[in-house]
Every structure is written in C-alpha cells, then in structure tokens.
Image (tube, rainbow, N blue to C red):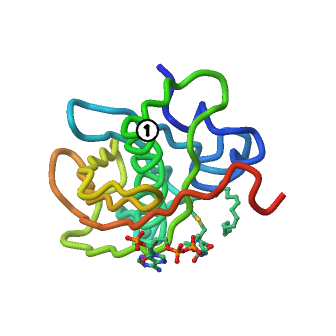
Amino acid sequence: MKGIQDYYPDHFAHCYGCGRLNEHGHQIKTFWEGEGTLTRFVPKEYHTAIPGFVYGGLLASLIDCHGTGSAALALAKAQGIELSETNAPRCVTASLQVKYLKPTPIGGEIVIKGKIKEVGARKVIVEAELFANGVLCVVGEVVSVLVPDNFGL
Ligand SMILES: CCCCC/C=C\C/C=C\C/C=C\C/C=C\CCCC(=O)SCCNC(=O)CCNC(=O)[C@H](O)C(C)(C)COP(=O)(O)OP(=O)(O)OC[C@H]1O[C@@H](n2cnc3c(N)ncnc32)[C@H](O)[C@@H]1OP(=O)(O)O
C-alpha cells in the first residue's frame, strides 16, 4: 500500500526522514486510518540512546515527517486532489514540539498516530502520539506549511 510519500514529486522526495528516493533515510510511509493518520517504523539496534531505548532525536524526526506527511494528506483531502503519480502537495516543517513521556524501548514496531487539528490554505497543524508496544511514549505537535511545487529549484 502506498503512503503519501509515494506521491511526492521526485524533487521533493529526498528528505532523510520520508524521502522515498533517499536510500540512507528512514523512508517512512504515512496513511489515513479513519479520520486520523498512521505511520509505522521499526527502530534498529543502532538507534540507541542508552542500550535498549530509542534515541530521542530519531523519535522527533519520525514525528516531524509523520507531521508533514499527515499535513500533505489533509491538504490533498481539503483541496479535492486525487492522488496519482507525483501530484501530492508538499509541506515543510515550520514548528516541531516534542514531549517525551516515557523511555521508548527498542525491539518492536513504533506506531505514530496523527490527528489533524487545523487545516488552512497553506498551514496545517497535526498532533502526534507515538506508541511502542501499545504504550504512549511521546507526544508532539507539528506545524507544516505548503511549499509551491517549483520553490527552491
Ligand atoms: C529543507 C527545507 C527548506 C526550506 C523550504 C524551502 C524550499 C522548499 C523546497 C523543497 C522542500 C522539499 C522537501 C522538504 C523535505 C522534508 C520535509 C520534512 C520536514 C523537514 O525536515 S523540513 C526542514 C525544516 N524546515 C525548514 O527548513 C523550514 C524553514 N522555514 C521556511 O522555509 C519558512 O519559514 C516557512 C516555509 C515554514 C514559512 O514561510 P512562509 O513565508 O511561507 O510563511 P508565511 O509567513 O506565509 O506563513 C504561512 C503560515 O504559517 C505560519 N507559520 C510560519 N512559520 C511558522 C512557525 N515557525 N511556527 C508556527 N507557524 C508558522 C504563519 O503564521 C502562517 O499561518 P496563517 O496562514 O495561519 O497566518
């Protein structure tokens, strides 16, 4: 199943967190799940903070790109864009807030759920909850802003 990241134009698909064309990156995929959004990721052993627990910077990165992906899904829906080929809207992060509630264990799948809090013409606010083994470990809020398709080229 394709995530929103599979529909970004090629020149917007090199992000370390979510670019499908970045072979060194995390290549996360973000989908709708009901009214919310969903991203899954399995940390590797080397994503370590202290042995057994995930590095917080990685968790922030996952929430960041889950946020921009969710924002793109929300903008596509709000603007009636039917996703096909590489026509997805593309957002960058204006603001990222992360709260670490509990240490996040390495050794299973991380699930990040997103709630679309606000959708404007260009700005989208997404609340994120990150779970490990069903336990809420991190929460965040991402403000994303749409960039024009040819910006920065
Ligand atoms: C690598 C990104 C480079 C920066 C963008 C340049 C080119 C884009 C080209 C390609 C992008 C392709 C792929 C992106 C890859 C990865 C994405 C994953 C996530 C990231 O790794 S991405 C890197 C970190 N990211 C940045 O490097 C952003 C640097 N920054 C800017 O490029 C500008 O700052 C920008 C575009 C954010 C806004 O610029 P702008 O001129 O469009 O803003 P404008 O004033 O029109 O605001 C419009 C509405 O956003 C609200 N707003 C603005 N800033 C806010 C803030 N900080 N907090 C809360 N709300 C804010 C306003 O309040 C208003 O809200 P309202 O409509 O409600 O009034």
Numbered-mark total: 1
Q: Secondary structure at mark 1?
A: loop
Q: Quick check: 51 above or below 24?
A: below
Splitting the image into four quadrants, where does ligand 1 fall?
bottom right
Residue 125 position in % (x across, y down): 33, 62
Mark 1, other Cα within 10 Å: few <14 / some 14–19 / many ≥20: few
User: As rendered, which of 113 and 44 lies closer to the eye?
Assistant: 113
Relative to residue 2, is residue 12 drawn left or right? right
> Which residue is found at the position 34% from the left and 41% from the top?
109
Residue 133 position in % (x across, y down): 21, 45
Which residue position holds label 1? 79
Relative to residue 118, is residue 18 drawn left or right? right
Tell me the kind of residue under disc 1.
Answer: Gln
User: As rendered, which of 136 and 145 lies closer to the eye?
Assistant: 145
> Which residue is found at the position 59% from the left and 21% from the top?
84
> Which residue is found at the position 37% from the left and 66% from the top?
142
Q: Quick check: 43 above or below 73?
A: below
Relative to residue 2, is residue 135 drawn left or right? left
Q: Which of the 4 image quadrants contains residue 78? A: top left
Q: Which of the 4 image quadrants contains residue 143? A: bottom left
Q: Quick check: 27 above or below 126?
A: above
Residue 88 position in % (x across, y down): 57, 37
> Which residue is found at the position 43% from the left and 31% from the top?
80
Relative to residue 131, is residue 69 drawn left or right? right
Q: Which of the 4 image quadrants contains residue 89? A: top right
User: As rendered, which of 120 and 108 lies closer to the eye?
Assistant: 120
Among all residues in the image, which is located at the extreme right?
Answer: 153
Residue 147 position in % (x across, y down): 62, 58
Determine whether the beta carbon of the residue marked 1 sits less than 8 angstroms from the nearest atom of ligand 1. Answer: no
Give the position of the C terminus as an image quadrant: bottom right
